[in-house]
Amino acid sequence: MSISIPRGTQDILPGEVEKWQLIEAKARELCEKYQYQEIRTPIFEHTDLFSRGVGDSTDIVQKEMYTFEDRGKRSITLRPEGTAAVVRSFVEKKMFGLANQPVKLYYMGPMFRYERPQAGRFRQFVQFGVEALGSNDPAIDAEVISLAMNLYKEMGLKKLKLIINSLGDKESRTAHREALVNHFKPRIGEFCHDCQNRLEKNPLRILDCKQDRDHELMKTAPSILAYLNDYSKAYFEKLQQYLTLLDIPFEVDPNLVRGLDYYNHTAFEIMSNAEGFGAITTLCGGGRYNGLAEEIGGPETPGIGFALSIERFIAALNAEGIKLEINQGIDVFLASLGEDAKDYTVGLLQQLRMAGFSAERDYLDRKIKAQFKAADRLKAKYVVILGDDELKNNKINVKNMASGEQVELDLNTFIKQFQELQA
Ligand code: HAM
């Protein structure tokens, strides 16, 4: 019996993987411009990191983690997201003591969530994310949002919608929380079991419930924006001012709460509004998480970041019909005719590659016509043809596949002449 790929995961094959590489390269290029440096943390962490960091009452921690006991009887979890680990590392490696502040980091790698797979939702997916730690300036919130928006735009996406909200500081949230409890408590019996648990633990999570989404009390729930204190209100207004200054259109959505517990002040999501994108339209999510560093044993540190998955990025590109320039062809295919010529191409191929060309040859003993077909399939710009006769006369032929033009070159100085041909 053959073994198939686990549900909710995928193989990214040649032909498709080039799209991933282009997005990854663009993300790295932008991080260089915005001055975010790469951090690589482990794929698994102690389970406590996520229950404390992401939050005990979130769906991620309650239902979606890949948690197991290792042979040393420790509870280990495959990371469901990247922020908690970055903050763990920030604290553990005492990055708060670095001279350069804020500390601006980015990461790219697989995350794992045991969710019900559907279009745009995988059990293993790759996130690109950034985290800026150590600044309380709303300008950095705007910077983080602009990085994400620019990445999408530079890859060609147009149908984007940015929604923002403020979850306020602790004081604002406490006041809002009380209002939520008062709002839902009298009729909590009409809500799902999860929401009933959430009422006392974390009533904000009720607003994020997929099951009770359409309950009338959801629509009339008190808005956090009405409970923001002066500092939180001013912070949110400043962010909006900066986004406007950066020419980034946005909508304020007071119902945006996000699925993780560590947020305060800024919360945002970038959605695709391309037609036919499917039910899950969120491409990117992020926000501010002042207090997370303390939660995992570090000093008080403000932080903000976002994460987006490459899977949904590509789905959005497909939905907008954007074709990335991939498979641009190789520089040269080396065709040979005769045994001696064939042997000679082994070294010649190496020389071409060392000279900087992408080069391929035949490894299946194909006839010359079939070698040309192989060259076509690889979209070779040149086919270099060496026969036993030419080899004897120290000659070699070069065919420009676009123009059909063919020239004979001297074999001894071939590489140099071939380089000149490109100039
Ligand atoms: P999140 O909203 O849980 O936030 O995930 C961020 C993004 O990851 C989503 O917008 C989506 O693009 C992608 N994503 C999440 N789950 C899946 C899935 N099952 N399949 C495919 N893509 C998925 C976080 O993870 C936070 N750590 C973001 C953050 C960083 N906040 C502050 N800093």
Image (spheres, rainbow, N blue to C red):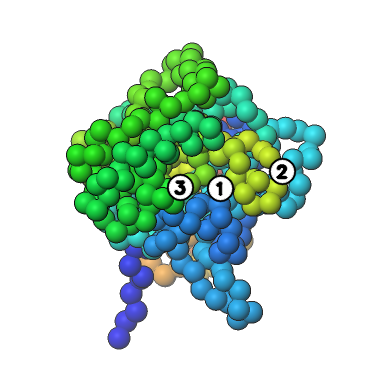
- 141 vs 284, left or right, is right
Q: Secondary structure at mark 2?
A: loop
- The answer to whether the residue labelled 2 contacts the one labelled 1, judged by CB atoms less than 8 Å apart, is no
Residue closest to the eye, 118 or 28: 118
* x and y percentages locating residue 236 in the rendered image: 49, 22
Q: Secondary structure at mark 3?
A: loop
**Which of disc 1 and disc 2 is earlier in sequence?**
1
- 133 vs 4, left or right, is right
Residue flagged by tag 2: what amino acid is it?
A: Pro
Residue under pointer 1: 83
Q: In the image, is the residue at mark 3 within 8 Å of ligand 1 by its beta carbon?
A: yes
Residue under pointer 3: 260
Q: Residue 188, can we see it?
A: yes
Quarter location, residue 176: top left
Label 2 to label 1, Cα distance in Å? 16 Å
- 144 vs 271, left or right, is right
Residue flagged by tag 3: what amino acid is it?
A: Leu
Q: Which mark is residue 299?
A: 2
* x and y percentages locating residue 35 in the rendered image: 64, 32
Q: Secondary structure at mark 1?
A: helix
**Which of disc 1 and disc 3 is earlier in sequence?**
1
- The answer to whether the residue labelled 3 contacts the one labelled 1, judged by CB atoms less than 8 Å apart, is yes
